Amino acid sequence: MEVEVKLCLTDANAHRRDTSLLSTFHVVTHRQKNLFFDGVASELSERRVVLREDEEKLDPRVGRECITEPGKLGSVEFRVLRRVKEEFGIEKGFIGLGGFGRR
């Protein structure tokens, strides 16, 4: 099981303090890149909806194409993407909102 905890830190000093405090419990660092997408007409952000997909296998080549051309995400056939398009009325495709990575 994976548990993810997010902390809202006020500044760099708070980050250093918490990192120091939690360092004895550190087991592994996951190298990952988090990318954020929305519908062209802001269909998700207007409803404060976040799409997080981490279960289905995606060809890395296709994933990189979707990063450079977010509109291609609409043609990827995954159950969760189909459901998002249907439930939130995403008709014009997706746009990229940026992201961040962990080293």
Image (tube, rainbow, N blue to C red):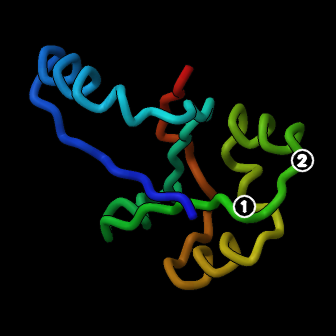
The residue identified by callout 1 is 74
Q: Kindly indicate the quadrant of the structure image that contains residue 92.
A: bottom right
Q: Residue at x 52, y 55 (%)?
A: 40
Q: Residue at x 69, y 36 (%)?
A: 67
Q: Residue at x 61, y 70 (%)?
A: 91
Q: Please state which amino acid type lies under the numbered disc 2.
A: Asp
Asked if 6 appears above or below 84 in the picture, the reply is: above
Single out the residue that lies furthest toward the front. 24
Labels 1 & 2 near each other (Cβ < 8 A): no
Q: Residues within 10 Å of mark 1 (few under 14, many from 20)?
A: some
Q: Secondary structure at mark 2?
A: loop
Asked if 89 appears above or below 16 in the picture, the reply is: below
Q: Kindly indicate the quadrant of the structure image that contains residue 14.
A: top left
Quadrant of the snapshot with the N terminus: bottom right
Which of 38 and 101 lies nearest the eye of the viewer? 101
Give the image location of residue 50, x and y in percent.
43, 61
Q: Residues within 10 Å of mark 2 (few under 14, many from 20)?
A: few
Give the image location of residue 8, x and y in percent.
18, 40
User: Which mark is first along the chain, 2 or 1?
Assistant: 2
Numbered marks: total: 2
Give the image location of residue 100, x and y in percent.
48, 29
The residue identified by callout 2 is 59
